[in-house]
Structures are given as structure tokens and as C-alpha cells.
Image (spheres, rainbow, N blue to C red):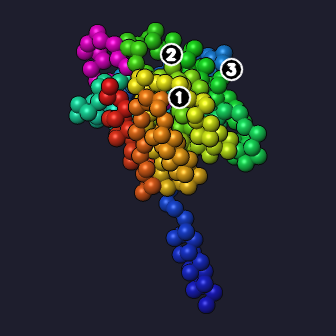
Amino acid sequence: MRNIIFCLLLITITIGCKKEIVYNDPIPKHNSLTIASKFVHEDRIINIWTPPNYNQTVDSFPVLYMPDGGIKEDFPHVANTLAKLIKENKIPSYILVGIENTKRGRDLCGPTKIEYDLSYIPNAGGANDFRNFIKNELFIAINKKYRTSSRKAIIGESLAGLFVVETFLLDNNMFDAYIAIDPSLWFNENYLVANFKTLSSKNYNYQKKLWFANSDATDISKHAKELNNQLEQSNKNLIFKYTDASNEQHNTIFRATKEKALIWTLNN
């Protein structure tokens, strides 16, 4: 009897736990450099992937920047997706610049006094320093070493998606196009969405693009939907696209939606 109860308990635990998804992405050929940053006060490893035609021309290329850009993070699968979409002529050729994490929560979140936030991300508040690192050090280093055009885009998921939305609102001129996949908009009591109207630029003149999507995570989806409602009612002349991907989970939405996001966003 005891063995039967143990087996039933084991089956219940197994069913109740979501299986962790393990990916084995091939690491594409790439370059790396290290920047000694005075803004985040540490060395940062940067990974750079250039499109197949980079060495076959003297043209300059737009750049897609990406937090969570380490080799053991999202850099390999995003680079491989860019290569696929470029080969299929679905997007123009882009350089990919991935920023490897050190203290992820610190870099990707703005300041907060909310107890729940601090219990989850105790070192939050460094997003502005991280943004200054990108703008005043990383941009310069990439432009010096690679043939880059003036067009820049950024992609991020979860906390990195939060950083993308915050950057769109607080320093909009940094990028031309923004991709935020399942952004953690719950942070700081939904500050970014709650204050979207006052934080956003008066008129984007159809020069900025924002793509965002949510999974089935309720603490994200409800705020993403509210952001979409605000944008639909606004007259700020922003080019935007919202995708409700509630059929996806937080740990599957990046790979499920990245191609659609890149195709819509990176095509002028």
C-alpha cells in the first residue's frame, strides 16, 4: 500500500512540474571584444555577428543590439535566425551585437521601492547606467570597428523586454526600432504603462517602430494589452504592432515569435 501511495505521489509531482526546455543551438562564427566601462564600472564582453555578405561588399550595415547577448544566452539562436531570414530575403542584412550579462537584474531594471520587486531583484536600479554604457561606449566601439549605418534596433525578452520599453520611453532617440518580447511590465507597479502618456514623446512622426508581444503570463499580458489599448487611442504617430501570443508560455514565446518580430521590425 505504501508503495502504491509513493508511486501516485511521484506521478502527481511529475505531472505538476513543467518540463524545462533545453536547447542546443549551434554557435555561429562571431567576434568578441571587451569594453572596460566607466558607466557600469566593470569589463563587459560583447559578441558580434556579421551577415554573410559583410565581407563581400564595402557597404555599411544597420545594427541590431541585444541584451542577454552572451554565447550561453540568446546570442546564438538570434544570430542563426538572422542568418536564416537574410538568406530567405525576408529581412535586410543586419549586424548583431550581443551584450553578455554580468548582473542582469541590476542592468535591466530601473529604480523601485516596491518590496516585491526588491525581493525578486534586490540590486535593481542600474538601467540608466546600462543605457549610458550602450549609448556612450558600446555604440562608439562598434561604429569604430565595423561598417555601420545610422539605423539601429534593439531586441529583448522578459526583463530585457522591460529595458527595451523603458529605453523607448526615456531615451527614444537611441534606436529606430524596438522589439519587446513578453516584457516584465509588472515591475515597479506597472510604472511604464501607467505613465505611458506622460513618458512618451509628443509625436513620433512615423519615424519609430515598436513591436511587442505577451505570453500567457498574466502579470505581463494584462499590462501589454493595456499598453496596446493606449497606443490604439493615441495620436502620437507611432508605427507599432502588438501580438497577443497567449498560446505561448514565458519560456517559449521568444523563439515562437522572433521571426515575425524581426521581419516586421527590420524592414523599413
SS class of the residue under badge 2?
helix
Residue at horizontal 35%, vertical 29%? 266
Q: Quadrant of residue 260?
A: top left
Residue flagged by tag 3: what amino acid is it? His
Q: Earlier in the sequence, mark 2 or mark 1?
A: 2
SS class of the residue under badge 1?
helix
Residues at circles 3 and 1 in contact by the CB criterion of under 8 Å:
no
Q: Nearer the viewer, residue 233 or 145?
A: 233
Residue at horizontal 71%, vertical 33%? 111
Q: CA distance from mark 2 to mark 1?
A: 17 Å
So how many labels did they put on this image?
3
Residue flagged by tag 1: what amino acid is it? Phe
Rendered image: mark on residue 198: none
Residues at circles 2 and 3 in contact by the CB criterion of under 8 Å:
no
The residue under label 3 is: 41
Query: Is residue 162 visible to us here?
Result: yes
Residue at horizontal 57%, vertical 14%? 136
Q: CA distance from mark 2 to mark 3?
A: 17 Å
Label 3 CA crowd tier, 10 Å (few <14, some 14–19, many 20+): few
Query: Is residue 160 visible to us here?
Result: no
Answer above or below: position of 252 versus 207. Answer: below
Task: Please state if 129 lies on the left or on the right of 72 as rendered.
Answer: right
Measured as percent of width and height from the top left, residue 100 is found at 54, 30
Task: Please state if 68 lies on the left or on the right of 205 as rendered.
Answer: right
Answer above or below: position of 113 versus 10. Answer: above
Q: Nearer the viewer, residue 232 or 91?
A: 232
The nearer-to-camera label among 2 and 1 is 1
Rendered image: mark on residue 168: 1
Measured as percent of width and height from the top left, residue 58 is found at 29, 9
Bounds of the magenta span? 51-66
